[in-house]
Image (cartoon, rainbow, N blue to C red):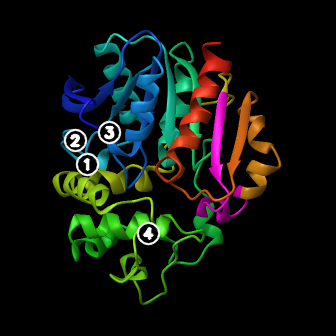
């Protein structure tokens, strides 16, 4: 871990934290999900640097060590895309492969659609390409669906505010590691779905939790609730959502995302390839939502194979 370097890039009026390791023209940029941070890519960054790639992992605005935006509740996915372009320009990186987890899939694919000249390929984990448009999932799920709750103004803030940041991250990691969608009862909050006796996933250490906890203690959850959850319906004016770049989707068979209405059929029927024609899909039989931390060696090899056969062969 000590070999990963850290810098701050001043763009878009904010100081953005960027973790980086490796050198050379073959650049891979990692985009985290929630409740993650640059640190969730630690295993992949070290592996890729050792294989001759330059690995770069920013914290989004308002996450981790990056500055919070002046008005967090007005943050958009468009801001994340503009930030990413500005960071790449600052670092003098013209073309990249994007590796994204969870909601990071959205800025990754939107960047590929809006700036195809900058994106050589896309790898996502836990979330496929989702066509632009209003989110429909909450219409088919109970009121206690975690995204519905977190989209509700002030509700998640009150729920999370009862606990310290480390405990919030702990609870969400446990919930998102399961194979069922977190849904609270009517008289229950999302944080109440986990109690202190529930163990962490075996691949997630107390040291890992402490690292995440300290970073979210600094940043808080205000921007994280805005992007992704309260910005899901944002219109980025994309009229032809077909991604031409080579792409790879890595899904754990036990990922709770498969339980989203229509999601399993969308992925496994191949309908997703209507939007990403050059897409390979790989399923990890024991994989959860956090495959890159749960099975780093396997995921590292899948990424390397994609890079060496589909991008820089």
First-in-chain label (4 vs 1): 1
| Residue 80: x %, y % from top left | 37, 35
Q: CA distance from mark 4 to mark 1?
A: 26 Å
Per the model, the C-alpha gap separating discs 1 and 2 is 5 Å
Disc marking residue 60: 3
Residue segment shown in magenta: 247-263
Mark 1 falls on what kind of element?
helix
Q: Position of residue 119 (x, y in %)?
A: 54, 19
Distance between the Cα atoms at labels 3 and 2? 10 Å
Check disc 3: other Cα within 10 Å, few if <14, some if 14-19, many if 20+.
many
The picture places residue 71, in percent across and down from the top left corner, at 22, 46
Mark 2: which secondary structure? loop
Residue bearing mark 2: 69
Mark closest to the chain's N terminus, 3 or 2:
3
Tell me what residue is drawn at x 58 percent, y 55 percent: 135
Q: Is residue 312 above or below residue 210?
A: above
In the rendering, at what x and y percent does residue 35 appear?
A: 37, 55
In this rendering, would 36 be left or right of 273? left
Q: Which residue is mark 4?
A: 174
Mark 4 burial class by Cα count in 10 Å: few <14, some 14-19, many 20+: some
User: What crowding class fits label 2: few (fewer than 14 Cα within 10 Å), some (14-19), or many (20 or more)?
Assistant: some
Residue 235 in view (yes/no): no
Against 287, residue 174 (above or below) is: below
Q: Is residue 253 magenta?
A: yes
Q: Of marks 1 and 3, which one's residue comes earlier in the chain?
A: 3
Asked whether residue 255 appears in the rendered view, the answer is: yes
Looking at the rendered structure, which numbered label has been put on residue 72?
A: 1
């Amino acid at each position: 871990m000590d070999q990963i370097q850290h810098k701050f890039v001043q763009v878009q009026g904010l100081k953005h934290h960027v973790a980086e390791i490796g050198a050379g023209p073959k650049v891979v940029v990692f985009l985290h999900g929630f409740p993650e941070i640059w640190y969730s890519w630690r295993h992949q960054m070290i592996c890729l640097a050792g294989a001759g790639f330059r690995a770069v992992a920013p914290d989004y605005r308002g996450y981790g060590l990056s500055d919070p935006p002046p008005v967090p509740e007005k943050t958009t996915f468009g801001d994340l895309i503009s930030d990413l372009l500005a960071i790449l320009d600052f670092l003098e990186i013209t073309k990249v492969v994007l590796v994204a987890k969870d909601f990071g899939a959205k800025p990754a694919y939107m960047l590929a659609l809006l700036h195809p000249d900058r994106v050589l390929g896309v790898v996502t984990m836990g979330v496929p390409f989702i066509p632009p448009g209003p989110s429909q999932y909450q219409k088919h799920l109970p009121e206690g669906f975690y995204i519905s709750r977190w989209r509700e103004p002030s509700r998640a803030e009150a729920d999370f505010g009862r606990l310290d940041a480390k405990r919030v991250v702990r609870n969400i990691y446990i919930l998102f590691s399961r194979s069922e969608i977190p849904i609270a009862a009517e008289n229950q909050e999302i944080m109440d779905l986990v109690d202190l006796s529930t163990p962490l996933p075996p691949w997630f250490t107390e040291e890992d939790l402490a690292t995440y906890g300290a970073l979210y203690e600094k940043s808080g959850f205000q921007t994280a609730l805005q992007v992704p959850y309260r910005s899901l319906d944002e219109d980025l004016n994309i009229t032809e959502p077909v991604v031409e770049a080579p792409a790879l989707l890595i899904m754990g068979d036990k990922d709770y995302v498969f339980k989203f209405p229509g999601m399993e059929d969308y992925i496994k029927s191949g309908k997703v390839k209507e939007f990403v024609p050059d897409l390979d899909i790989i399923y990890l039989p024991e994989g959860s939502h956090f495959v890159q931390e749960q099975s780093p060696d396997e995921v590292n090899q899948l990424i390397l194979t994609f890079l060496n056969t589909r991008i820089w062969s």
